[in-house]
């Protein structure tokens, strides 16, 4: 029998921690142990990138850097770089509702790391070898310049720095060498701790699925250091930005605002930047999920300054040309959204697994492609993703008519897989029925023919709106900030998950 995998989606930031945000320390190893108890094989995380305005890991200051917030404080204490008393001084407990307080982290975590750096052996052979690679020279200079400019976007810097005048940059790097070296230290420590955690997970039989945003932020190292790779005007500003047009879920579409790639220029050197980025990701993770994969076939361009995504045009992307020599790489394609023949052709030619979302499968259409009875092995099944409502929120937000259609359709599908799910019409709006529907969806996910089943922890817990991770197209302190209580990861839950997986031969 071919191996069938089950995993859980939980961002590192959502792990329990005494310092306000999840990190690479003990709680991460405890979660790996929980995955083992639960019979899982995959831990899917969200991007580990540095966050900026809006706190989104999908809008980062660098496409290959690591977030300093994820560096574990207790590990630094164990290295003698800070004391427990100092860690307490800079402690960030998070918000009163238990969520991550990113503003407090910004003001407290960086000073704590600078204190640790002041005691770090910057002459160690390991650190010097890291510096010799030069991989984070641009990022470290970029971050030092941002701090020198009061953390403003680089479009607001002095022109000589904004346009990378060589003499000005030389003078800045010489006079700010220690600050630049600090940002190198954050990357050195981040990747050292990450590799130790990944080694621990792999040693316990758990693979890590990472997540790669398609686009980079306008205020990023890449746009500053390599403007030729993006569609910018003569002033270095995008005239068109990324997003997706209106659809069933959003009448205004989604206006992301990211700069768009200059694909003809990238093609000239065989897509070297993208190949290097993918290689880097696959050196950090066992599997990489690429967000908004359809953008490689065609991408939507919205005029800069638009208030919504209603007005835009489609341009051709690199299509399968970028992936000709990468078909055996362990990549999962997030192929959600507006699909057309070009996207289907791209998916077929690359051969990457496609995503199936159960929340959207039960609308009364027996041929819906997200129904388990309608898809094959080369799939990754989710109840929902980090961008979707939790199952309980999703069901709660339906009106009675929609919920009846969903339940009726789900009941029909469950019979095909030998899963019991019956409901009484008078109990359509009952929370107990919603929980029964949630459990039925999880069972048929595990029984489905898909090679991979990845479920958000919130759906395994049966929690509602209060635990949602992100609401696409919105800014606010609720996004990206949910954290899992320590007591939620119980042996009882692990055993329940393990049994369900076992019935699905996972």
Image: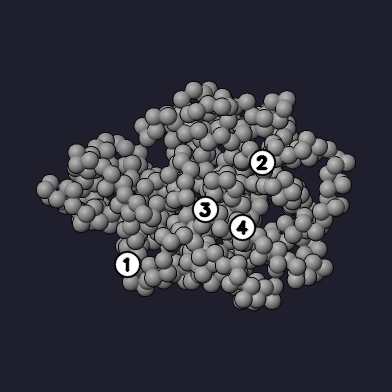
Q: Distance between the residues labelled 2 and 3?
A: 24 Å
Q: How far apart are marks 3 and 1 (CA)?
A: 25 Å
- Which quadrant of the view contains residue 374? top left
Q: Where is residue 129 in the image (x, y as percent from the top left)?
A: 80, 62
Q: Which of the numbered marks, if any, corresponds to residue 153?
A: 2
Which secondary structure, mark 4?
A: helix
Q: In this view, does 220 lie above or below 434?
A: above
The residue lying toward the viewer, choosing from 297 and 16, is 16
Q: Residue at x 22, y 40 (%)?
A: 399
The nearer-to-camera label among 3 and 4 is: 4
146 left or right of 479 in image:
right
Q: Can residue 210 be seen in this view?
A: no
| Residue identified by numbered label 1 | 496
Q: Where is residue 496 in the image (x, y as percent from the top left)?
A: 32, 67
Q: Which of the numbered marks, if any, corresponds to residue 141?
A: none
37 left or right of 101 in image:
left
- Which quadrant of the view contains residue 438? bottom left
| Residue identified by numbered label 3 | 46
| Residue identified by numbered label 4 | 107
């Amino acid at each position: 029998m071919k191996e069938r995998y089950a995993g859980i989606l939980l961002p590192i930031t959502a792990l329990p921690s005494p310092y306000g945000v999840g990190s690479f320390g003990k709680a991460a190893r405890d979660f790996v142990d929980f995955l083992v108890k639960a019979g899982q094989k995959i831990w899917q995380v969200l991007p580990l990138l540095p966050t900026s305005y809006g706190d989104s890991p999908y809008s980062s200051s660098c496409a290959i850097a690591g977030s300093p917030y994820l560096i574990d404080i207790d590990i630094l204490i164990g290295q003698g770089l800070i004391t427990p008393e100092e860690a307490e001084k800079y402690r960030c407990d998070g918000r009163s509702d238990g969520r991550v307080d990113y503003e407090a982290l910004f003001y407290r975590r960086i000073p704590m790391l600078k204190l640790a750096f002041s005691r770090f052996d910057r002459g160690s052979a390991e650190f010097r070898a890291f510096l010799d690679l030069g991989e984070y020279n641009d990022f470290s200079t970029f971050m030092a310049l941002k701090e020198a400019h009061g953390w403003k976007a680089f479009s607001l810097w002095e022109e000589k720095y904004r346009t990378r005048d060589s003499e000005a940059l030389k003078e800045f790097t010489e006079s700010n060498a220690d600050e630049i070296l600090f940002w190198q230290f954050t990357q050195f420590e981040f990747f050292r701790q990450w590799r130790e955690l990944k080694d621990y997970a792999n040693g316990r039989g758990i693979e890590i699925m990472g997540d790669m945003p398609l686009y980079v932020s306008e205020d990023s190292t890449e746009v500053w250091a390599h403007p030729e790779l993006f569609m910018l005007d003569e002033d270095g500003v995008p005239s068109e930005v990324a997003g997706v047009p209106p659809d069933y879920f959003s009448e205004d579409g989604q206006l992301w605002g990211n700069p768009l790639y200059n694909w003809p220029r990238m093609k000239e050197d065989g897509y070297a930047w993208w190949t290097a980025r993918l290689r880097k990701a696959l050196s950090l993770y066992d599997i990489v999920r690429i967000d908004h994969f359809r953008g490689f076939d065609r991408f939507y361009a919205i005029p800069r300054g638009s208030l919504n995504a209603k007005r835009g045009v489609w341009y051709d992307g690199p299509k399968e040309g970028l992936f000709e020599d990468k078909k055996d790489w362990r990549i999962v394609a997030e192929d959600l959204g507006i699909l057309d023949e070009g996207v289907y052709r791209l998916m077929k030619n690359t051969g990457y697994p496609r995503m199936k979302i159960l929340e959207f499968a039960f609308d009364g259409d027996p041929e819906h492609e997200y129904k388990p009875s309608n898809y094959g092995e080369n799939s990754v099944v989710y109840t929902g993703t980090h961008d979707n409502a939790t199952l309980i929120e999703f069901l709660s937000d339906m009106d009675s008519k929609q919920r009846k259609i969903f339940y009726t359709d789900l009941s029909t599908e469950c019979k095909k897989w030998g899963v019991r799910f019956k409901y009484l019409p008078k109990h359509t709006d009952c929370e107990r029925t919603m929980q029964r529907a949630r459990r039925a969806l999880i069972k048929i996910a595990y029984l489905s023919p898909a090679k991979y089943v990845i479920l958000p922890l919130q759906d395994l817990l049966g929690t509602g709106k209060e635990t949602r991770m992100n609401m696409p197209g919105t800014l606010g302190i609720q996004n990206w900030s949910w954290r899992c209580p320590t007591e939620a990861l119980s042996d009882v839950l692990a055993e329940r998950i393990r049994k369900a997986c076992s019935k699905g031969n996972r």
